[in-house]
Image (cartoon, rainbow, N blue to C red):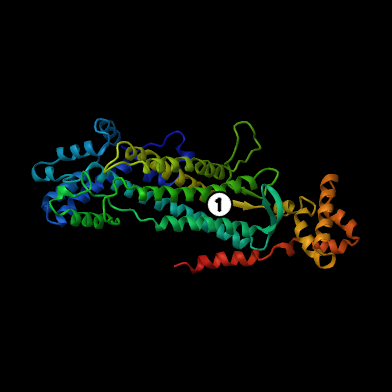
Amino acid sequence: MTDRPGLFDPVLARGEARTAVADDAWVAALLEVESALAQAAADVGTLARADADAITDACARPVDAHALGEEAAASGNPVVPLVAALRQRLDGAAASGVHRGATSQDVMDTAAMLVSRRAVAAIAADLCTAADATAGLAATHRDRPAAGRTLLQQAAPITAGLRFAGWCSGLDAAVAALDAWRPAVQLGGAVGTLAAFDGHGRALRAALARRLDLAEPVLAWHTERGRVAELAGLLGRAGAAVGSVATDLVLLAQTEVGEVREDVPGRGGSSTLPHKRNPVAAVSARAAAIAAPGLVASVLTGASLHEHERAAGPWHAEWRPLTELLRAVGSGASWLADALGHLAVDPDRVAASLDATGGLLLAEQATTGLRARLGHAAAKDLVTTAAATAQDEGRPFADVLAEALGDADEVGALLDPAGALGEAAALVDDLLQTRKDRP
């Protein structure tokens, strides 16, 4: 049975991560682990290869995820009915070889690592696409002056290229962090002693890790949930990177600002307002990012409360929020890649924003430029008074400052944005060069 998208999935569960964490994908991962466990047993000589192959063949046949979920209620996890179903497909030594020595959590945790690895790969790919788009924007707008904003107020000039480079840096860092995560196999038996494997437990664990291309831990991590907590944190970081960029996009696309827009014909309309062209991709990416922190908290709460050798409840509590976290961050990454891939920058609106305060954006530069002639205190007082007058009287700052100084030409030089950009262009170049130098 193929999972069908839910009502909200096209908006809130976009991208390949949704497929990677679907119910069918979870069941496929459970079957993959059971098959690999049998083959690993054959590798170390505790199960005949023919029996292992029979188990693998049984695992290759589909299992109805929804029926499995219904049956899982009786035992508290889906591995128990899955093992029963596999054994019914086999007989003799092959049937008894299914799941031999393992506990349900061994299979469920290992499957979770496989599911997560595939979802993380999809997330990283979309984040890379988004980062590449921002790098292109940074290069194109490297020298374009723009209004820099702090606390949602215009502060001082930057370049549009530096803003885009900042987005790129955050996305690249999130990808690098996800790429460094190493999922591990889980195998310890009932209480982590490997007792049911008759002395072959460590060898079997190593063979299983090789079969699934997972890291091999020294001990079972049934209640030491650092790997799960680490993954949640990395996904939270990725969600934050997505949310930061998406928030900027939404703000820059506001009607009163209009510095950017999503250039996708036919998208962004309203049910009642014919003129609307909403930044749907950025809005959807932001919605996904908003959901991520709560899901991170849920995963971390469960991961911190596992007791003794196997937990009663906290382990079960991880499954849904981890799945939803992977789905949410994946959706955000996919939507953000879409938004940035269709982003149009309006140079005229960028320039208009830069001029919106009548020169107030250059107050800091004016103070710096007047220090040599007037001294620090006098320069600051003069500019501060001129800025207050301009704001209180609704007059252009340039005009008020020119009256105070008696020299319009000097004011023109002081309030030239090109002189207030610092090392913005070089910083963009540094970011782009860093990306070129990556292995």
**Quadrant in the picture for the C terminus:** bottom left
Q: Is residue 355 left or right of residue 435?
A: right
Q: Is residue 419 left or right of residue 167?
A: right
Where's residue 150, x and y in %?
Answer: 67, 51
Q: What residue sits 45% from the left and 58% below the top?
A: 176
Mark 1, residues whose alpha carbon is within 10 Å: few (<14), some, or many (≥20)? Answer: many
Secondary structure type for disc 1: helix
* Figure check: 18 above or below 166: above
Q: What residue sits 62% from the left and 61% below the top?
A: 140
Q: Mark 1 points at which residue?
A: 340
* Figure check: 332 above or below 64: below
Q: Picture quarter containing residue 382?
A: bottom right
Where's residue 58, x and y in %?
Answer: 18, 44
* Residue farthest left in this picture: 92
Q: Is residue 330 left or right of residue 44?
A: right
Q: Which of 325 and 230 is in front in this view?
A: 230
